[in-house]
Every structure is written in C-alpha cells, then in structure tokens.
Image (cartoon, rainbow, N blue to C red):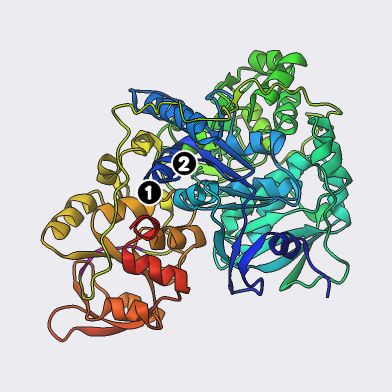
Amino acid sequence: MGLNITEKILQAHRVEGDCTPGHELAIRIDQTLTQDATGTMACLQFEAMGLLRVRAERAVSYVDHNTIQVGPENADDHAYLQSVAAKFGMVFSRPGNGICHQLHLERFGRPGRTLLGADSHTPTGGGVGMLAIGAGGIDVALAMGGSPFYLTAPKVIRIKLTGRLRPWVSAKDVILKVLEKFSTKGNVGCVFEYAGPGLKHLTVPERATITNMGAECGVTTSVFPSDAVTRAFLEAQGRADDWVELAADPDARYAREVAIDLSDIEPLAAAPHSPGNVVTVASLAGMAVQQVMVGSCTNSSYRDLKTVAKILAGRQIAPTVSLGLAPGSRQVLMMLSKEGLLTELLKSGARILENACGFCIGNSQSPASNAVSLRTSNRNFEGRSGTPTAKVYLVSPETAALAAIHGRIVDATLQTEVEWPRVREPKVYPVDDSMFMYPPADGSGVTIIRGASIGQVPRNTPLPEVLQGVVAIKVGDKITTDHIMPAGQRLKHRSNVGVYARYVFEGVDPQFPARASANRDQGLHNVIVAGESYGQGSSREHAALCPMYLGVKAVIAKSFERIHLANLINFGIVPFVFESAADYDAVEPGAPLRMESLRTVIEGDGRGILVAGEGEGKRIKVRTDLTERQRRILLVGGVLNLVTP
Ligand code: MIC
Ligand code: SF4
C-alpha cells in the first residue's frame, strides 16, 4: 500500500511504537529549534537532566521574542542562551537576526527531515516538506540530547488544492479558509497534508504561511510536498544540496480528503477574538481602523513585505492610522533596503519595527483602548495585543496595506484605485549568516553566564494516593495558554518560575495565584476545571509549570489541546476529562474535590470517580487516556524526576 508524506517521514524516523493513527510512536528528531521565551527553561532543563552535549543533527537557539529589554531580564536571558549554546553545541541566532520560523525556513529547513521546536508555530517548516512539530521546552531539551520524541501517530487529512489564487488574494486567505472549514478545535491528533494541481502556483513562503497558521486549527503539523517549487527556493537560498523530492504515493491513503478551489477564495479575516472567527473582508468593508501591523512568523517574508511596499509606494497612510512593519529576518530587511523599498515605506509614513516577534506577542505596539487593529499575525485572542478592549482582525498583507492607506477596511478585489502588486520569487536570495554563531567543537571550556534573573527549574513531588483537592478555578471553553500564562509585559519573567507564577490567570482571575498558594500551603491540592479545548494556542510550558508551582495537581476539562496536554503530564499534573460533559455544570468553583485512589487510578486504566462538594458530594466519572510512559511520568511527578530521579 502506498504511503502519504507524513507516513514516509514518520516511518523513516520511527524508533519505537506504531505508525497506526492513535497509537504511540517515538521518532528520531533531526533538528531542534528554541526561542528565548521558551529556550531558557528548555536549556535549564537540559542542564538539570545532566545532558552535556547536543546530539541532534542541528539545534538552533533563536532570540526573537523578547528583544524589548526593559530592565535587565531580557539581556540576562540572551547572555545565558548564548553561553549555553556555545557550551552544549547549539547554533545561536543573535537578537536582531530575525524571527525563528522565518529564519529556520530560509537557512536550515530540509525536506524529509524532522524538526521539533519549542514554539507552536514550528510547523512553518512544513512549507519546505519537513515534518515540523511544536512541543514543550522539556520535550525539545530531551530531543536536543538525542532522545526520541513521543507522539500519537496522527490521522492524515489531505487538503487538495485546485485552481489558482485571484489577484489580491493570498496565502493568508487560504489558511483562513482552512480555519473556516476546520475551526480551532476538534483537530487534535491530525496532520494536514497539502496536495493537488494548485500547489505549483504557491511559492515556499506562501506555503509556509499556510503551514504556520495551521497551528491555530490544533493539528500536530501541516506539510507540503517537496517539489520543483521547493527546489527553486532552496537553490535561491544557496542550499540546492538540501533538496530531496518528496511526494505522496499515488495510492496513499488518508483519513479524510477536503478540496479547496483556490480561485474561489476571496479576501478573508479572522474577527475578534479567535483565529477561527472567519468572515469575508467584504463584510467588514468601511470599518474604521486605527492600527495596522504587518509582520509575525505568518506574514513577514520578502514576498509579504514587498507586496505591502508596492501598495504603499507613492502613497501616504491615513492620518488616523499607525502602521508598523516588522520584517521576518535581516535577509528580508536587506532586500527591501537594496531595492529602495524601505525608502518607499518610510515615505509612506510606516513605522519600521525590529525584525522580531514584537507586537505579535503583545510586548509592544498595544493598540489604543477600543481600537480596531488589523494584523497579519496568527492569533487575536482577547488581550494578547496588550489592550483587552481592542478588536484585533487577522488579515493578509494586501488587506492590511490597503486599510493603512484608506483608514478603513477595503475589499481589495472590489477596488480599482491601487494596481495589484505581483511579486515574484527572487532567483537568488542574498545570504548573510553572520548573525548565526556556530558553537566550538569542544564547549567544555565555556562558562555559562547566569544573570540575576535566571532562576531554577522547579520539580514536582510524586503523585499522592489521595487527591484532597479544591476547585481553585472554573473556566469555560477555548481557554488559551495566553489566558493561563500571559506573555506581553510578563514575558520577561520566563526564566524565573517563582516570579512568573504570580501572574497565572492574570486576565481571567487575578486572585488565582494568592488563592492557589494559600490552598497549597494548607496542604490542599488545587484543581482547575475547564471546558472544551483547554490549552489552545502556544506551546509555552509555563502554562503547566507555573500552575504546578502553585500546587495544581489536576485539570479536569471537556477536552484538551495536544501540546498543553503533553506539558501538563510532563510536569506531573493529571489531565482528566469528564466522562459526561454535563458533569462540568455540577462542579462549583471553590468546592472540595476528592479522589481516594489517584495513584491507583493512574496505575490502572485511568478511569476514576471524583467526589465533588461537601459530605457525600456528587460522584463524577473522569478518565485520562495515558500511555505506559505517561503513566510513569505522572506517578513520579514529572519528566525531570523520571530522567534524573
Ligand atoms: C506565541 O505565538 O504564542 C508564542 C509566544 O510564540 C508561543 C511560545 C511562547 O509562549 O514562548 C508559541 O506559539 O508557542
Ligand atoms: Fe513570534 Fe508571534 Fe510567531 Fe509566536 S506567533 S513565534 S510570538 S511571531
């Protein structure tokens, strides 16, 4: 029987387990990626596990998330990461080099290889035919050290693209179409595999926009074949040798097939406050806009920025709009500069921002109160921009640029004033790798620089037999890791769990940390109760690590997102699901919750009864579907205890 691309890569990397969908599988990881916001903890964990040297074929440590440097914390992180990279054998991408996913695609991504990244948008690498998966930092630390990565073998969904995009419609509209079809929940354990005659019209940067934002559907990853388009891109990046052909066999099988005719797609937007709230740009036409932000790992390629520059050339942005542009990498910025496009952008009134995550993670460029902000990024969760009252719409660079000129939303396909900017892929990309620092062959002489804000890795205690709990918080559906562990202004505390834990659920219930600590200090176990799709969004393991620090022992939800579920287990927090979703309503915040034989349940089939409320209480059936390995991790109180008891 023929194989699809996902199966081909998985089989070539299988270390143990079974590629049958739903089964646990361990794969060899060729490349790893970390960034400063997740990387410090990953490296501290690498150290804590006693690992001495990177064994993966390529490990790159990027600095791109927090380059604001208000106070010493960010610079302390950067210095720590740079020294650790040299000591353990990672390539260090200096602050100012660009956004991890854009850079990785340009300089390191290779078809047919596996990439594990401590960032949920790692699937960007699927644009060049890699199997690129986001994970928590500790899983990436283990993979850096040469351990395999454990995952549930995915169900592969084939998305067949036909036709060709119309002028003014671009890759962002394609992925918004995919989000409209699949939504942000219910896709855990799936991979999107793109196919069909429409592929040949999509360049690698366009494909990468699509695989990048597939993360918002909650899939394990998304992947394109490696074809002539991929080859041309790698050649233009001076990496012709990295190309290999990769295609699904003609008789490959898929769990599901969906067809999208590219020529039918119209400009789309994700309305507040979810990437899944997809509407047509035409339905928003005329809405006044106060801010436009172009950039992020979704739309910061040369193609995207040049498109914006050509739309703005010879025009001024509206006086009521603030336009910010953050190119994805130095390569992009240098190309804009060389072609005179930077001058055009500056003349138009655009504000050129650092080539980093910046506005996307909400650590700068917060919109005004109640403002409408159009962004080319991938997430518009409430408050992520730093302004809870702002209304953030996610759009293509084309829609963003036109709105900047007009001061209101315009459907590009319905206007004739601005000529469509056709941007072609360059034959040669200018390569300058001088901001990648390669490690010495022997790092033993390197001293690790530990600034004052670099903390310790906290450990959990083994799982207790009796859960003597309390519902410390009850939340609804689609709680994102941004709700659990805000980034933005708080991002600078990532290397210090004790400090960062003061902000758990800050925007949802600011009293949570104090209440949870008080419960913990009285010997009670904190339990989080949640609705559907708990832990959507980022890979930040702090959304498990900091609750763990506050004494959270279990989360009971209607369903979980993949990376967050793995992170909870990695830090010894039991992820239970309600057997009956109706029981969610029966659990009151603040109520006692008891399970007599928690360890026994975890050692057994994962099915147990919780007693909620005073006295006899209400009996609630819960379950957790664990693999043998996950069971062991939970029982000892987390991966760290398993690896270094
Ligand atoms: C994000 O886009 O939410 C982030 C910030 O890149 C996160 C990683 C982090 O929280 O450090 C992600 O996507 O995993
Ligand atoms: Fe950075 Fe935003 Fe991409 Fe996350 S989504 S990696 S914050 S640019």
Locate the N terminus and report the quarter of the image it occupies: bottom right
Residue 190 falls in image quadrant: bottom right
Residue 619 image point, x, y percent: 26, 85
Residue 418 image point, x, y percent: 78, 29
Q: Amino acid at mark 2?
A: Leu
| Number of numbered discs | 2
Q: Is mark 1 within 8 Å of ligand 1?
A: yes
Q: Is mark 2 within 8 Å of ligand 1?
A: no
* Residue plotted at (69% across, 16% down): 342
Residue 260 highlighted magenta (yes or no): no
Check disc 2 and report the residue beneath it.
52
**Marks 2,1: beta carbons within 8 A:** no
- Provide the secondary structure element on which disc 2 rests: loop
Residue 353 falls in image quadrant: top right
Q: Quadrant of ligand 2?
A: top right
Q: Amino acid at mark 1?
A: His
* Residue plotted at (34% across, 52% down): 545
Residue 293 image point, x, y percent: 57, 32
Locate the C terminus and report the quarter of the image it occupies: bottom left
* Residue plotted at (23% across, 84% down): 618
Q: Disc 2 or disc 1, which is closer to the eye?
A: 2
Helix, strand or loop: magenta stretch: strand
For the record, the magenta segment spans 469-475
Which mark, by number, is residue 542? 1
Which mark, by number, is residue 373? none
Whether residue 293 sits left or right of residue 561 in the image: it is right
Task: Give 292 or 424, whichever is nearer the viewer.
Answer: 424
Whether residue 397 sits left or right of residue 621 in the image: it is right
Task: Give 580 or 289, whichever is nearer the viewer.
Answer: 580
